[in-house]
Image (cartoon, rainbow, N blue to C red):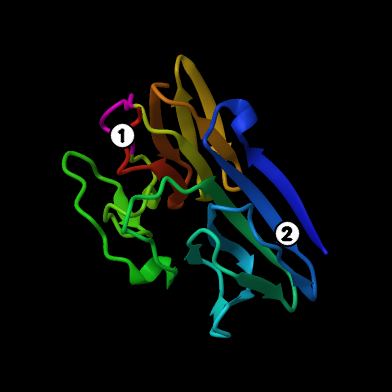
Amino acid sequence: MTLGAYLITPAMGSHFVMYLAKMQENSLSGLPPYDAERFIFVVQGAVTLTNVSGISHKLTVDSYAYLPPNVEHSLKCDGSATLVVFERRHASLENQPTEQIVGSTDQQPLLETPGEVFQLRKLIPTSIPYDFNIHIMDFQPGEYLNVKEVHYNQHGLLLLEGQGIYRLGDSWYPVQAGDAIWMAPFVPQWYAALGKSRSRYLLYKDVNRNPL
């Protein structure tokens, strides 16, 4: 059995869904809707991903997988696991298909963040076929975004570690590991890390497509 909790859905104005899947012993996943791409990230436990070719990958904490639309696959859990899952209708481009990706956060290089102090990793290629990316952002205690951001992109955020304060519009919210945030287009946003340990969050961001 798997317990699911939708955190973000199109009913809120998003073009994607974000949910938590708590897989119990011997549970098996289903497939996303037709033409929907899927991204999974392991928050707790471990699962085994198997594709239509029978190739399997064991995904542990901080591991992830991107599955292109209409690709047969399954996720099996022998013990228990918690996943954060993103799904959206793929905005496909002619002759530019996406490919299955399996990886782990620590395998990804740190990227430059001009004018900022946080550490950034991107889990999906930045090439044109992909219409969203997943960022992992790390802040040491006391670090903060130097720029208050306002843009057309949509965000779904899950705080994986630590605590801090998030500004959305004119409101300020204390947040801690396990909290999720929906950020609509053009909502002013800003973050500062508090506490005595690193804070890390996972962030969905739509990319590479004309917003019209």
Instruction: Give the labeled residue for mark 1.
Output: 210
Marking on residue 72: none
Left or right: 81 in relation to 203? right
Q: Residue at x 60, y 27 (%)?
A: 12
Q: Quadrant of the C terminus?
A: top left
Sequence-first tag of 1 and 2:
2
Residue 206 is situated, as x and y percent measured from the top left of the image, at: 39, 41
Callout 2, which amino acid? Answer: Lys
Nearest the camera: 70 or 133?
70
> Is 65 above or below relative to 151?
below
Q: Cα distance, mark 1 to mark 2?
A: 35 Å
Callout 1, which amino acid? Answer: Asn
**Which region of the structure is painted magenta?**
144-151
Marking on residue 22: 2
Quarter where residue 27 is shown: bottom right
Most extreme residue toward the left is 114
